[in-house]
Structure formats: structure tokens, C-alpha cells
Image: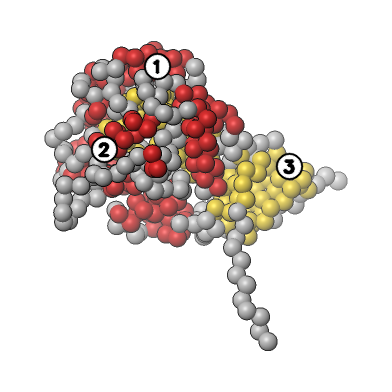
Amino acid sequence: MSKTPKFDLLIRNVRLEQNGPLVDLAINSERIAGIGSNLMCDAGDVFDGEGAFAFPGFVETHIHLDKAGILSRCSICEGTLGEAVRETAKAKAAFTEEDVYARAAKVVESAIVSGTTRLRTFVEVDPRAGLRSFAAIKRIREDYAFAIDIEICAFAQEGLTNERETYQLLETALGDGADLVGGAPYVDPDPEGHIAMIFDLAERFKVAVDFHLDFDLDPQHTDLPAVIRETEYRGYAGHVSIGHVTNISAMKPNDVRAVADKLRDAGIALTVLPATDMFLNGRAYDHLVPRGIAPAHVLSAHGVLTSIASNNILNPFTPYGDASLARMANFYANVAQLSRSEDLQNVFDMVSRSAAALLGKAYSVRVGGQADIVLLDCSGPEEAIRIVARPLAGWKRGRKSFEAPKARIFPEAVT
């Protein structure tokens, strides 16, 4: 007589695809041990998903935890990229490790309850911040590992060829736990030199590269060719990603397709940051203001690996935000004027499956897979984008990381 199987956790009545059948997920030792309808088993804990959509969680590919929540320390008069860099640089000089930790923790906790299970954060290391922010975010990575996987990009925001001390600080960070390296060529007096130096560090420490790139609306002003050349010359296909590239939004369709072909062939991934890109761009226009957001869905259709991300939260680059990738994806779909089911599925992928691929991580709900599971109050990916679905609960490696039960309405009693 066969024994009833026993599991650590059983999540009942969830969907794994849009309007899919209800299934149960059985979890043992941090792994998904079984998927099926009406699983007969014993479990240490049982959670009824009540028809919720289950997936491995949102993936944040581009966020700045170190400079989040500093609005009260900065002025926003112009609303431009240059002003945001200047104001943040002034504030950054006074950052302490505990200050950065406290602000970052608030954003990470918001990301967790918003259903994010993995993120990449940029951390600025330079003569103003030193390694204080880096030390704080390393602690954040360790303290919140129970709920979210965090990778750290040691980042040069204010130039590199003009500040050699920054190069040394990047070296130190890469030798002390940073996962990859990145830079912003558009603020460096020698953009191509900046790009080459970042690649030098990446090769030396055997890590990936992530650039903030072409953050304006001038298609003729671009550092992308230099990034493509270095990527191909160094055999770095699949290990390079770029963020913003807002000048693509000002290109004609044929030019966009040409850029897409180059990015695809070079193996370079692209992330759009809708909130920041729309807030900072187009300030010179007094009517028909351009959106300033690269058409990620068009690039994706031509084979480019794309993602949608938050970038900044409550600072001069983005004076709002809550780390909700469901909201950010919905915002992108609105701005891009997308409505078809397949388009919304693609947008969902850009904050989930495709975003995980950009980070080089496996991503699936499957038997034998890691039990990273988030439940959304919706019937699947398409509806998640349409309604900005609320996360209900999440598990990281089979351990519950948060719960946010459905709201209840209490109608007036009938007398």
C-alpha cells in the first residue's frame, strides 16, 4: 500500500498561464516537487491561492538603491538630466552608510511586497561617495536574501577618464563583492575612453557590463557604436546590457530596425526606464512633447533582449515611484499604446522572464525548479498588466517572504 506523499508546503488552486486550469504546487527543500490538479498529499503548510496567477516573481534589472528617497535634500527647478546629476552629486557627498542602508531598505521592502524576487542595483563609487554606499548595499543584499536576490553593479555615474580615483574605487568594489561594472559615457569628456576602461575592468574581473547610454533625443549623438565595437572585439556577446538609449525614440522606423539588428547581432540587451525617461526628456518642447522612451516592444520583435525597469525612486531623476514593476509595465504599455493580448504578454515578459534572461538567470515554475513563487490577484500575465494586479503572497526558496491578503468589502447589513 503506497504512502501519502509529504511536502513542506502545498499551494493550492493557482494558474500558471492566462486563464489556465487550476493546479497545486507541492514544495520540498526549497524546490518545486510536484505540479498537478488536486494533489493528494500531506503538507506542513497549505495555502489556498483561490485562482491567483502564480509565477516566479518580477525581476528588476535597473534600479538605484543608493540614491533613493533623497527628494528633500535636492531642488528640482529645470527637471533635466544635467540638474539631476548635479543635485544628486551634491547630496551624495553627505551620504553615510547607515543613511544609505535605511533608504535602500525601504525601497527593497516595497519591491518585495510588490512581488519582486530578484533585482540589479547600481551603486555609485567615486570620490564623493567613496565606498560608503557600496558597504551599505552589501549589507542590504545579505539582510534581505531571505526574500530577494540582489546583484550589485559598481557604477561610475560622473565620469571616469576625468576622475582616475573612481577607477581605483571600482577596482576595490569589484574585488570586494560587486557582481558587475557599469558606467555612463554621456557625462565623461572622453566617452569612448570611458567605455574601454569599463570593459577593461569587466575583462579583468570576469564580470558583465551595464551602461547608461544615449540619454537624450538626438539620434546623431550616440555612444552606441563604441559599445558595439568593444562588445564584438572582446567577445562579450550576452554579457552587455544598456539602459535608457532614449534617442531611439526619436528615430524613424527604418532606423529603429537598423539599431535593433545591430544590438541583436552583437548580443547586447536593452532596458527602458519609462518613468525617468519620460520625466527628464523633452523639456525643450512646449507642445507635442516627445515621450522619450525607447520602443522596447519593437526592439524585442526584432530579436533584442529587452526589459522594463524602475531606475530611480523619489529623487531628482524620478520624483515618484514605489518599486512596483506591475505598475511600471502598465505605464509602458499605456505610453506605447499597446492593447493586444500578445503585446501585453510581451510587456509582462519584460518584467519577468526576459528580465531574468538579461540577468542570465533561470526562470520558470517547474518540477525541480527553485521555489520562488509570487501570487498575483489576476487570471494571468495579460490581466496583470491591464489592471496592475496586486501581489497576494510570495515565497523565496519555499519560505514565505510576504503576504498581502485580498481587500474585503463589508456591505451594509440588510435589515
Which residue appears at 32% of the width and 19% of the height?
198
Q: Nearer the viewer, mark 1 or mark 2?
A: 2
Q: How is the image coloured?
A: secondary structure
| 138 and 55: which is toward the camera | 138
x then y, percent, for residue 38: 69, 56
Residue 322 visible within the image: yes
Which residue is disc 3 drawn over? 8
Dot 2: what SS? helix
Q: CA distance from mark 1 to mark 3?
A: 45 Å
Which residue appears at 55% of the width and 47% of the height?
113
Which residue is disc 1 drawn over? 169
Q: Nearer the viewer, mark 1 or mark 3?
A: 1
Q: Quadrant of the C terminus?
A: bottom right
Q: CA distance from mark 1 to mark 2?
A: 25 Å
Tags 3 and 2 in contact by the CB under 8 Å rule?
no
Q: Which mark is residue 76?
A: none
Residue 354 visible within the image: no
Which residue is disc 2 drawn over? 83
* Label located before the other in sequence (1 or 2): 2
Q: CA distance from mark 3 to mark 2?
A: 52 Å
| 375 and 408: which is toward the camera | 408
* Label located before the other in sequence (1 or 3): 3
x then y, percent, for residue 308: 38, 43
Mark 2 Cα-neighbour bin, 10 Å: few <14, some 14–19, many ≥20: some
x then y, percent, for residue 389: 49, 57
Amino acid of disc 2: Glu
Q: On screen, 21 above or below 310?
A: below
Which residue appears at 35% of the width and 44% of the height?
318
Left or right for 102, reference 192:
right
